[in-house]
């Protein structure tokens, strides 16, 4: 998850041409709320407000990107499920071939899109991924004990990704949506 955060901050620096530390300072409030609630859906209103007011993103862009991101941008969850599946396979002594790893990755990415934006929603999806890979789901008992703490970090990463996407979309399409809004106001 730390590598994913570094990737997001690199995008802010390279694509948006903004200081990543200033970006982190601006999104502190949504990140803290995401961390404390472990729910992307609960953070949506404050993420939209932060994008509009602190990041200078057009409301047309944030009103679209944030809800879509809260629904399908579950990068932290997908990463967690891949790592957990590999961990569980190793714990049970199950050899995974390269083809199995690729299939697990695609399954997890596709399943994470449908993961509910609620605390603990990823565990349900993880059970189905483990079962489809032929890994016993009994080991989930160990994971459930730490899932809430990891879920807090995953949600903070997911919210950071949503706000990074807002900044990138605003960089490429922000002027177009602002011109459209100004035209609509004059008409």
Image: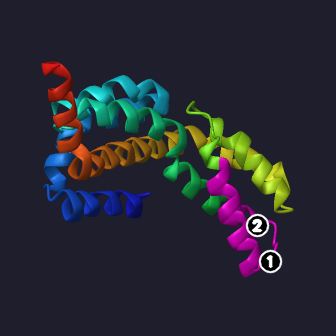
- The residue that appears at 50% across and 51% down in the rendered structure is 76
Frontmost residue, 106 versus 36: 106
Q: Tell me if residue 139 can be seen.
A: yes
The image shows residue 144 at horizontal and vertical percentages of 67, 42
- The residue that appears at 31% across and 37% down in the rendered structure is 61
In the orientation shown, which residue stands out farthest toward the front? 187
Badge 2 or badge 1: first in the primary sequence: 2
- The residue that appears at 79% across and 48% down in the rendered structure is 128
CB under 8 Å between discs 2 and 1: yes
Q: Name the residue under label 2.
A: 89
In the depicted structure, whether residue 166 falls above or below residue 5: above
Q: Is residue 180 magenta?
A: no
The image shows residue 136 at horizontal and vertical percentages of 86, 56
In the depicted structure, whether residue 21 falls above or below residue 37: below
Q: Tell me the element at label 2.
A: helix
Q: Give the range drawn in magenta.
A: 85-111
Q: Name the residue under label 1.
A: 95
Q: Tell me if residue 87 can be seen.
A: no
């Amino acid at each position: 998850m730390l590598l994913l955060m570094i990737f997001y901050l690199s995008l802010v620096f390279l694509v948006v041409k903004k200081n990543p530390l200033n970006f982190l300072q601006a999104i502190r409030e949504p990140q803290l709320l995401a961390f404390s609630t472990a729910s992307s859906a609960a953070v949506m209103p404050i993420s939209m407000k932060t994008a509009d007011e602190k990041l200078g993103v057009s409301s047309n862009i944030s009103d679209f990107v944030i809800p879509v991101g809260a629904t399908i941008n579950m990068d932290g969850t997908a990463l967690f499920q891949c790592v957990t599946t590999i961990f569980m396979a190793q714990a049970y002594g199950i050899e995974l071939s390269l083809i199995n790893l690729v299939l697990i990755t695609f399954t997890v990415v596709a399943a994470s899109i449908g993961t509910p934006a609620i605390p603990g929603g990823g565990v349900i999806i993880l059970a189905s991924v483990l079962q489809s890979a032929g890994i016993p789901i009994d080991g989930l008992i160990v994971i459930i004990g730490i899932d809430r703490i990891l879920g807090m970090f995953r949600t903070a990463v997911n919210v950071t990704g949503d706000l990074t996407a807002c900044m990138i979309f605003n960089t490429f399409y922000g002027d177009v949506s602002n011109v459209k809004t100004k035209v609509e106001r004059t008409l």
